Image: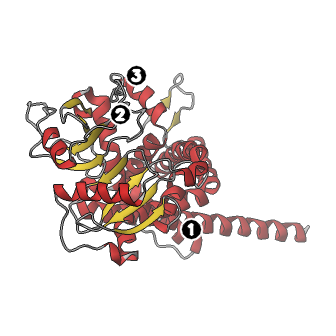
Amino acid sequence: MELVLAKKSPGASRLTLHSFSFRKYTRRLHLWLGLSLGVLLTIICLSGAVLVFYVEIDTWLHPELERSQLATDSSWDSALHTLNKTYPNKKGPWRIEVSDSKRAISARYYNPVETRSEGFAPLMVWLSSDGLSVLREDYWGHYLATWLYNLHYTLLFGEIGTFVIGYIGLATLFLLVSGLVSWWPKQGQWHRAFTFKRRRSRIGLLYDWHKILGLASAVPLLLLVATGVMLSLPQETNRVLGLLFSPVQTASKLSGIANKTIQHTVPISDAINAARQANVAQNGADLRQSRLAWIQTPDNNLSAQQFYTFRFQIPEDPSHRFPNTFVYVDAHSGQIISTYSAWKHGPANSIKGWLHALHNGSVGGLALRILWVICGSIVFALFSLGFTRWRLRTSKKGSSTLKTQSLR
């Protein structure tokens, strides 16, 4: 199979996928991108491999968070009461995760004054399954699991680090493609291209191992890197998707008259029942059979409009932890204010809805998550093999040059 990149008049040389000069340039590109990005890319991929199971790892490190029973709708009211009583100065909304596993109830308070200078560092609180007691509290980035998350997502450089990660990802796509192009076999040589050759030199063996591991992980790594770039550069991703499909739609910001006096707030359990009546599915079905993933409680500051936000996973949504269907319920009347589902707004929104589940492997269950861990580890092996081979070749060339000079 031959790809003609440029065609000249008969008799003139042509630049093809297998031409010497083209392979020479792609190999150099692959080498220098690998040497330039290798260390950072290894850090990103190894931390990402750990983060595939970061919730489970954090629970394992804190066995007090294991629980014997699942929380019920009434547990959320108890949890909110405990949070308001324990943290009376936290007047803003709490986000409570609804987990279907045997882990403690977790809640987040965004933008606490204690970590305002740290950027994204919400207060993290874990409660018992009945919501009556606080088991643990910490701040995002102050404990191992979330420190690794920040390392993977920002290289510990905050918002600027997110952009750096995104553009490292773009360069990594060129690294992967240049590696494939450099390897691409000629017609009739495909079988040989996938096998180890009989070599005596260490340099040759390192090349074969680098080749086989690279080919085995090429497709998963392309998918992981592409989704990682899109998650790191959301605005740029929206512009590209808007050009290819239709503009990306987001939930409109709720506007209304703020409550100037403290009023009765409907219980979370009643608000959940109201939210489940919302019709957001394509077939007009309600949310009674959909899984509730997150609860955001009302903002208790008198300058804010008060409403609950419920985040549901509907059948077509692959994202288990961060689904893309929202229902807003008035905190005083218990009536639905608004709904939003990304799956009703075209292919651009649908593509974005798949990103998180693909990147963390949750869409494929345990098997895909394990594969993602292996792929993250393979990146370390690829860099080690490539770097070692480069060092051996350069040292060998250096010693040959010295011998030549000594004979003159």
Left or right, 291 with respect to 152, comes to left
**Of tags 2 and 1, which is closer to the observer?**
2
Which kind of residue does numbered mark 2 sit on?
Thr
**Of tags 1 and 3, which is closer to the observer?**
3
Residue positioned 89% across, 71% down in the render:
406
Q: CA distance from mark 2 to mark 1?
A: 64 Å
Query: Tags 1 and 3 in contact by the CB under 8 Å rule?
Result: no
In this view, the residue in front, 112 or 132, is 132
The tag earlier along the polypeptide, 1 or 3, is 3
Identify residue for label 2: 261
Where disc 1 sits, the SS reads helix
Identify residue for label 1: 384
The mark found on residue 264 in the picture is none
In this view, the residue in front, 153 or 59, is 59
Q: How busy is the neighbourhood of tag 2: few (under 14 within 10 Å), some, or many (20 plus)?
A: few
Q: CA distance from mark 3 to mark 2?
A: 47 Å
Q: How busy is the neighbourhood of tag 1: few (under 14 within 10 Å), some, or many (20 plus)?
A: some
Which kind of residue does numbered mark 3 sit on?
Leu
The mark found on residue 243 in the picture is 3
Residue positioned 57% across, 32% down in the render:
13
Query: Tags 3 and 2 in contact by the CB under 8 Å rule?
Result: no
Q: Name the quarter where the C terminus is drawn.
A: bottom right
In this view, the residue in front, 287 or 207, is 287
Left or right, 139 with respect to 313, comes to right
